[in-house]
Image: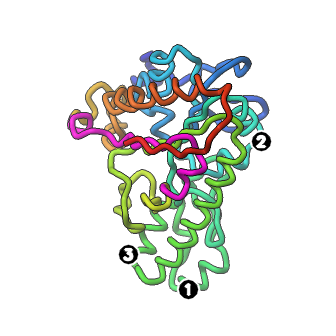
């Protein structure tokens, strides 16, 4: 899968779209007829710099088509605002949903780009009133903007975090309700699920806490903690494929062993749910760590 483009060695991701969607997912493009598993997520699911991301590995382990709906820097808005993507995911027997952060989605304080959810577009009057001392035109990315606000005034910033958490939970409930097959929530990250709403801004799923995920458990068929092991993290960028200039970006992501661990943990759960597709859903909300 290696290729050289413009003198830069990297991976060929075969970016593709489904239906009339304008969202680019990792390819090659898959047929959506028949039985399949959908995997919704962000950069980690897309598998940036990873030759075989966990959806591809899961497919090999279970012998069932797994469609990678991972989108770079995605928030929940990518999936909820795109009818084509939702319709595609609705056809899956099982949908694995990577737990995404609460920062990259539009809310009462600010708006993000509808497809590139990490892009900050504008502050609302509510946010400018809360932070009248900030020129929001200086920000292009949500993470940069939020980190600056937290540093400036943690007390005022707490109001923003509360709004993001409320919005995130409501949208997760909506997304789960729209999916028609069995649903698995997957925490796939380098760090464990935090108990605090104020994590380090290097964390992948900003402002999502264990308590928030626990509240969703009765609405889904399983919740899996796929936190990468120390062994996987200790390998750094070994096995990743990237151009020399992309080294800083690669160092912020999990490597191939983390993806292997995730696929191996997912496989028995997804197989069990596929076998149960003919049985009524119980809403048992199984948590598997």
* Residue under the image location 48 percent in, 40 percent down: 43
Q: Which mark is residue 10?
A: none
Q: Position of residue 271 (x, y in %)?
A: 52, 23
Asked whether the viewer can see residue 71, the reply is no
Residue stretch rendered in magenta on the structure: 214-234
Where in the figure is residue 133, as x and y percent of width and height? Answer: 51, 85
Secondary element at image label 2: helix
User: What is the spatial separation of the Cα atoms under label 2 and label 3, in whole angstroms?
Assistant: 38 Å
Q: Quadrant of residue 11?
A: top left
Residue holding disc 1: 132
On the picture, is 87 further left or further right than 156? right
Q: Quadrant of the C terminus?
A: top left
Judging by the rendered image, the residue that carries numbered circle 2 is 83
**Residue at image point 50% right, 27% down:** 55
Q: Residue at x 67, y 48 (%)?
A: 175
Q: Which mark is residue 151?
A: 3
Mark 2 nearby-residue class (10 Å; few <14, some 14–19, many ≥20): some
Residue 41 picture quarter: top right
- Vertical comparison of 117 with 29: above or below: below
Residue nearer the viewer, 268 or 190: 268
Locate the N terminus and report the quarter of the image it occupies.
top left
Mark 2 to mark 1: distance in Å?
A: 37 Å
Mark 1 vs mark 3, foreground winner is: 3
Residue found at x 45% / y 30% = 266
| Rendering coords of residue 204 (x, y %) | 42, 51
The mark nearer the N terminus, 1 or 3, is 1
Foreground tag (2 vs 3): 2
Using the image as rendered, state which of residue 194 and residue 217 is in the foreground.
217
């Amino acid at each position: 899968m290696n290729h050289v483009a413009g003198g830069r060695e990297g991976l060929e991701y075969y970016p593709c779209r489904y239906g009339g969607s304008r969202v680019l997912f990792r390819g090659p493009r898959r047929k959506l007829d028949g039985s399949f598993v959908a995997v919704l997520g962000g950069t980690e699911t897309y598998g940036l710099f990873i030759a075989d991301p966990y959806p591809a590995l899961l497919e090999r382990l279970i012998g069932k088509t797994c469609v990678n709906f991972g989108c770079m820097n995605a928030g929940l808005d990518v999936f909820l605002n795109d009818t084509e993507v939702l319709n595609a995911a609705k056809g899956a027997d099982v949908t694995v949903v990577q737990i995404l952060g609460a920062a990259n989605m539009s809310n009462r304080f600010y708006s993000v780009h509808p497809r590139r959810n990490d892009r900050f577009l504008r502050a609302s009057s509510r946010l400018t009133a809360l932070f009248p001392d900030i020129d929001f035109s200086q920000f292009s990315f949500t993470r940069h903007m939020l980190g600056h606000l937290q540093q400036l005034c943690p007390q005022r910033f707490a109001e923003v975090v509360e709004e993001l958490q409320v919005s995130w939970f409501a949208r997760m409930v909506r997304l789960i309700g729209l999916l028609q097959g069995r649903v698995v929530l997957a925490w796939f990250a380098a760090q464990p699920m935090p108990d605090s709403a104020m994590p380090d801004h290097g964390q992948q799923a900003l402002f999502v806490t264990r308590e928030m995920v626990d509240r969703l458990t009765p609405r889904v068929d399983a919740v899996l903690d796929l936190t990468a092991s120390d062994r996987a993290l200790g390998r750094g960028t070994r096995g990743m494929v990237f151009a020399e200039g992309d080294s800083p970006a690669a160092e912020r992501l999990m490597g191939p062993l983390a993806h292997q661990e995730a696929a191996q943990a997912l496989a028995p759960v997804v197989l069990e749910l596929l076998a149960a597709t003919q049985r009524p859903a119980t809403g048992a909300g199984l948590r598997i760590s």
